[in-house]
Image (tube, rainbow, N blue to C red):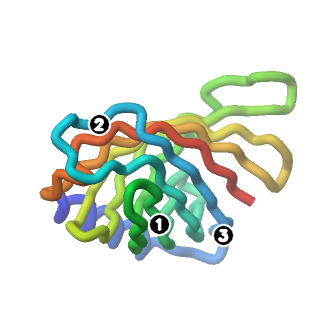
Amino acid sequence: MRSLVLAALVLFSAQAAAENQYASLVTFESTAARPTTDERNVTSIVNTAMELISPSNVSVYGGFSFVVGESFESAVVLGTRFYSATPAFQLFPGIPMWSYIGAGIATYDELTYYPEAGFRVATSDATRLDVFIKILNSKSDVYDKHFMVGAGLTF
């Protein structure tokens, strides 16, 4: 699975063109469910990243992650997202909502990979709000099988 995620990141980051958009991405994730065998608990994760969004509705992001819990840890995060071509919903007039799926990796004490799914809401012309879920997978019991619920801001 890790090689598949890495191959997808390399493939889509190689397609960068002049019409791509760059954005800052800040997210906060909270643990909704975790195994009971954890020695240490992951309470929440804060991510800061730069996102490259292509016209073909594919984005690649990379940045830093900070784990908050019984112990503090930081990591490098890389991921990719595939957005719906047209808005999935229209909350109010002029406020579209796109759905997306994605995958990423984080370099905590053990390499952790995750699938993600969520919605991106256009709150203004330059700001987007993300609401998502992630399932962390790792060889480390500290991060494996954690179900995360999060929200983010792109500007």
Residue 150, placed above or below residue 21: above
Q: Quadrant of the N terminus?
A: bottom left
Q: Residue 22, labelled with which disc?
A: 3
Front position in the image: 67 or 27: 67
Where is residue 16 shown, x and y percent of the image?
A: 52, 74
- Tag 2 and tag 1, C-beta contact below 8 Å: no
Residue 126 appears left or right of 117: right
Q: CA distance from mark 3 to mark 1?
A: 19 Å
The amino acid pointed to by label 3 is: Tyr
Front position in the image: 58 or 153: 153
Q: SS for tag 3? A: strand
The residue beneath circle 1 is: 65
The amino acid pointed to by label 2 is: Arg
Which badge, 3 or 2, comes first in the chain's sequence?
3
Where is residue 52 shown, x and y percent of the image?
A: 57, 67
Residue drawn at 33 percent across, 72 percent down? 10
Q: SS for tag 1? A: strand
Q: Quadrant of the C terminus?
A: bottom right
For discs 3 and 2, the disc positioned in front in the rendered view = 2
How many numbered dots are placed on residues in this image? 3
The residue beneath circle 2 is: 34
